[in-house]
């Protein structure tokens, strides 16, 4: 008796040039890394064309940066106004402590902004002598998995598969 409904079938890798199967290294919705292709969304690149892979962090959140700039400008303006009017000489010790605490507001805003909305992780590469943003993610774990899969794809493509991987081949040593 067979049950009707969803069934799972083994993944069939797409056939590459020459009828060989293309090894799947990473697959999540919208991201596929094979030995031959790296696909993110609707954009796809041939792995052989990608060189100079590097990672970095994206820009800081614009709202946090604006909040820091506005707060720092306001605090600096108040400090300058008090300095030019001679008001700093008439302040008490408690007022200096409050003013010092207010000067910490931009620093705290910057730290909070980076904590709540950290800069995205970015994977860059060169394709035909042009720098291209290949992948960007807020999730550090997913970013690491995609980056490792793409680097494995580059190694497999360069060395012809797992059998010829540089970790499996005895290193060349000069004779003395």
Image (tube, rainbow, N blue to C red):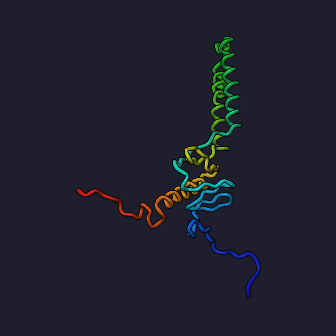
Q: Residue furthest front?
A: 18
Specify the farthest residue to the left: 176
Question: For this view, does 136 lie left or right of residue 156?
Answer: right
Identity of the residue furthest to the right in this view: 4
Where's residue 58, x and y in %?
Answer: 62, 42
Q: To which quarter of the image does residue 3 belong?
A: bottom right
Image x and y of residue 128, in percent: 56, 47
**Residue at 58% from the left image edge and 66% from the top image edge:** 16
User: Residue 139 placed where, x, y %?
Assistant: 63, 52
Image point (44%, 62%), residue name: 165
Placement of 158 over or under 2, stated as above or below: above
Q: In which quarter of the image is the N terminus?
A: bottom right
Residue 117 position within the rendered picture, expressed as x and y whole percent measured from the top left: 67, 44
Left or right: 114 with respect to 129?
A: right
User: Does 115 sit above or below residue 92?
Assistant: below
From the viewer's side, name the closer residue of 50 and 67.
50
Which quadrant, please, contains the C terminus?
Answer: bottom left
**Vertical placement of residue 39 versus 82, above or below:** below
- The residue located at (64%, 55%) in the rendering is 44
Q: Which residue is drawn at 47% across and 65% down?
A: 162
The total of numbered circles placed on residues is 0
Viewer-proximal residue among 66 and 146: 146
Of residue 118 and residue 153, the one placed in the foreground of this image is: 153
Tell me if 87 is positioned left or right of 20 in this view: right
- Quarter of the view holding residue 18: bottom right
Q: Which of 141 and 46 is in front in this view?
A: 46
Residue extending farthest to the bottom is 1
């Amino acid at each position: 008796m067979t049950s009707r409904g969803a069934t799972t079938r083994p993944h069939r890798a797409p056939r590459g040039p020459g009828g060989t199967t293309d090894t799947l290294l990473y697959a999540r919705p919208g991201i596929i890394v094979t030995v031959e292709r790296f696909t993110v969304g609707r954009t796809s690149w041939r792995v052989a064309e990608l060189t100079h892979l590097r990672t970095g962090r994206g820009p800081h959140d614009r709202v946090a940066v604006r909040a820091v700039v506005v707060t720092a400008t306001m605090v600096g303006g108040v400090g300058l106004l008090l300095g030019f009017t001679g008001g700093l000489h008439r302040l008490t010790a408690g007022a200096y402590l409050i003013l010092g605490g207010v000067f910490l507001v931009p620093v705290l805003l910057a730290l909070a902004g980076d904590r709540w909305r950290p800069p995205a992780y970015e994977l860059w590469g060169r394709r035909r002598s042009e720098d291209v943003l290949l992948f960007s993610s807020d999730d550090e774990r997913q970013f690491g998995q995609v980056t490792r899969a793409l680097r494995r794809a580059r190694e497999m493509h360069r060395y012809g598969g797992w059998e010829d991987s540089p970790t499996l081949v005895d290193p060349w040593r000069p004779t003395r």
